[in-house]
Image (cartoon, helix red, strand yellow):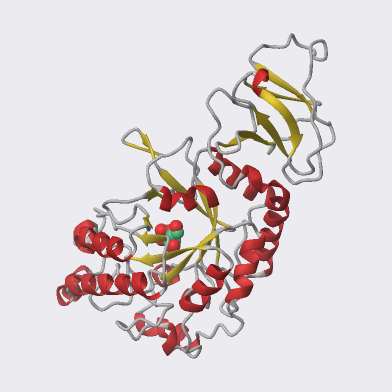
Amino acid sequence: MVGNMDKSWFDFCRFGLFIHFGLYSLPARHEWVKYYEKISDEEYYKYFNMFNPDLFDPYEWADIAFDGGMRYFVITTKHHEGFCLWDSALTDYKVTNTPYGKDIIKPLVSAFREKGFKVGLYYSLQDWHHPHYTIDHIHPLRDLPKEEACKENSKRNLSVYREYLHGQVKELMTSFGEINEVWFDNSVKYNPDYPYFEGKGREAWGTEELIKIIRNYQPNILINDRLDGEFDFKCPETYMPDECVKVKGQKVRWEVCQSLNNSWGYYRNCSGYKSPHQLISLLAEAVSKGGNLLLNIGPTGRGEFEPKAKESLKALGKWMHNNSDCIYGCTEAPSEFSVINNILTYNPKTNRLYIILINYPNIGTLKIKGDKRRVEYAAFLGDNSEITIKTQNQTFEKMKDDTIYLNIPVDKPKDEVPVVELFLKDRF
Ligand code: GLC
């Protein structure tokens, strides 16, 4: 694995909370609503003038996330809409100028930090509000007639925006104490359907200089991979890689982000909520491939987690309460072990192997490929009840030397996803 000790929290925590909160929480129709509905900047101000999350309680958010088993968080300080959730000196388009009138980021960071969370800040490179952010093919004004769009862009000076971006990132890196992770979103690929708009990448963002600024103020920070330049971890989105993510053949840190439903920002009429079983499987699968899960909640315009989101975290917390040993500090299992239809994780410090039974076998036997001489003891993690190892003559088929046969009950234990813990020995 790349990286050093100061960054090892990332490999230990494994499970984080993503928070998408902004003006888009009011229309409650996806955080890209301004883009989808091609809403003008003037019209979008109605949400700015209405923004008043009166029920926002950062301690409540931190408690819910902690009880759900999450140990770090990443909050949108500014999303594509350009609205800032902190009291930036560089813009008026910020939370302190809304009816709410108070900073969100500062109290949030301190509440989560008090609870022991590592702190991550999301910052959108795209900005649909800044007057010098040039129109591109993923901008609310993208479908202006070509002449008009080009005329408008000729009045915009991207280097002014770049300076603003650098200044804001400097603010974020210097105003809230130690920041453990920074999450940039997103470079803009050139799109031949809009040949008169340029893409935006390292030159547009001034990536090299930006990274210097960040590392200067936060030497231990982890930077994601969307700046079109150097990075510390990869961040596949709503996707599950087949194996540990590699760059030039080397395993790297990675974190998959997933939403609870089909939207990042609060979406009132959203369906497609993932079940507790699916969420546990996502987390387990990410860890089994050496990665992290960053699971998103979009708080409502009143600043609360909606009941369904709370239910999901409650179910995760219930499972994590007695099964978190197969998540924290865990990673891929040694390659000599494998299991069919289920998931393996491994804690290299304690030398324990975990079989996460997302598909509970109902035949009284659990088979794991591996050397049984390496197994000292086996138990369910949920209640520490012993699981015996099958001996000769107890199976239908001839027992294979390279397979561990465990006697597990036909009735699935009460956990949503039961976990078997194998205590391994190095020598036998
Ligand atoms: C996408 C979307 C954005 C969201 C992000 C989270 O890039 O543009 O709305 O914040 O994914 O991964």
Q: Quadrant for the N terminus, please.
A: top left
Measured from the top left, where is residue 417 in percent x and y? 72, 43
Instruction: Identify the residue at image location x=70%, y=60%.
Output: 314
**Nearer to me, 124 or 273:** 124
Establish if 309 lies above or below 111. above
Which of the 4 image quarters holds residue 81? bottom left
Q: Is residue 143 visible?
A: yes
Q: Between residues 268 and 350, which one lies in front from this camera angle?
A: 350
* Residue 272 position in % (x across, y down): 62, 56
Decide if residue 387 is on the left or right side of residue 38: right
Locate residue 290, reporting x and y percent. 50, 40
Asked which quadrant contains residue 144, the reply is: bottom left
Q: Dividing the picture into quarters, in which one does residue 37 lie?
A: bottom left
In the image, residue 416 above or below residue 201:
above
Residue 14 visible from this viewpoint: no
Residue at image x 16%, y 77%?
Answer: 155
- Residue 165 lies, in percent from the top left, at 27, 71
Residue in the foreground of this view, choosing between 43 and 388: 388
Residue that extends furthest to the front in the rendered view of this protein: 427
How many numbered marks appear? Answer: 0
In the rendered view, does 99 fall on the left or right side of 380?
Answer: left
User: Is 270 in front, or is 305?
Assistant: 305
